[in-house]
Image (cartoon, grey):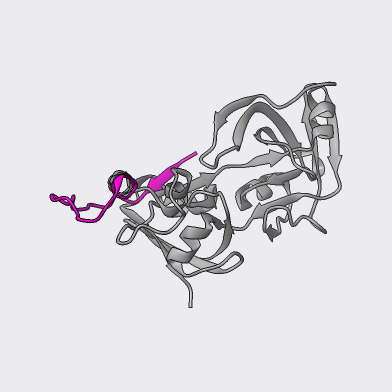
Amino acid sequence: MTTATLPSPQFAIPGHAIPGLDRSGVERIVREIVLRSRGIPPSQAAAAGRNGESLRGVEPKLVVSISARHCHLTDEHVEKLFGPGRRLTPMKDLYQDGFYAAEETVMVVGPKRKMLPTVRVLGPTRKASQVELAFTDGISLGIDLPVRASGKIAGTPGCVLVGPAGAVELGEGVIRAERHVHMNHADAAHFGVRDGDRMSLVIKGSCGLVLRDLLVRADATSKLEVHIDTDEGNAADLDHAEGVELVRQT
C-alpha cells in the first residue's frame, strides 16, 4: 500500500514557566508540545490521552493510501474457501487500528471465466462478503463496476471466489469503492465537515490533479486517511507527489 503524508508542522517551545499552573497543567502543556512535534492529528491526540480538541495552529497529518484490489469475507465464506474451522491469519496491520491484510488470497472469476488469480483478503470479517476493484480490474474481468460506498452492495454484480478448499458464488458485492476519507470527529471539526459530506483531495506534482467528491467517513476512532484506488493513484503518480491537501467543497 502506497502512502503520502504532509510534512510535520513546526512549533515554538515556550522558554519560561507560566505562573498559576499546577502539575497537571504543566503535564498537559508538555504533552501538547510532544504531540505538536510529531504532527499528530486531533484523532491521534485524543487517543494519546487528551480530550479530543484540535491542537491550535497544528495542521493534521494527512495520509493518502492506495487501496489495491481486495475482498472482505464473512466467517462462513472463510470456512468455505479455506477449510472448516479456519480463521483469517493477520499478515500486516493497516493504518486504521484493528484492520489488517490477511495471509489469505482468493481467485476472483468473472463472466466468461476471466479471472484475477490472487486477490488479497482484508480483515476482520464482515456481515457480507464484498470485492473492491479498480475500473481496469473490472475491464479485465468483464464486469461493469458500479461506484459505491463500501458496504452498499445491493443490486451490484456478482462473481465467483475460489480458494484452496472450495468456491463461493456471490450474487452481488463487486464494486469500485468510491474514494473517501476516514477521520475522527475532532478532525472533522478541524475541517468544518461532518460524516457524509464531500471534500476534494489536491495532489501536487508533475502529474498533479484534484480528486473531487471524496466521501467523508467520520467516527469516534478513525485516523485521518484518504483511500483512493490504483487507477487514481497511478494517474496522479502519487509515489512522486510533492504534497497532498484536503479541501472542503463548497
In the rendered image, residue 13, in percent from the top left (x then y), is placed at 18, 50
Quadrant position of residue 107: top right
For residue 250, above or below residue 151: below
Q: Does the magenta stretch include residue 23?
A: yes
Drawn side of residue 100 relative to residue 240, left or right: right
For residue 213, above or below residue 235: below
Drawn side of residue 169 relative to residue 109, left or right: right
- Decide which of 159, 63 is in the foreground and name it: 63
Q: Can residue 164 be seen in this view?
A: yes
Magenta stretch bounds: 1-27
Q: Residue at x 67, y 50 (%)?
A: 139
- Decide which of 219, 71 is in the foreground and name it: 219
Q: Which residue is drawn at 17% across and 50% down?
A: 17
Q: Can residue 211 be seen in this view?
A: no
Quadrant position of residue 84: top right
Q: Residue at x 56, y 62 (%)?
A: 216
In the rendered image, residue 165, in percent from the top left (x then y), is placed at 82, 22
In the rendered image, residue 91, in percent from the top left (x then y), is placed at 58, 25
In the rendered image, residue 132, in percent from the top left (x then y), is placed at 67, 47
Q: Does the magenta stretch include residue 220?
A: no
Which secondary structure type mostly characterizes the magenta part of the structure? loop
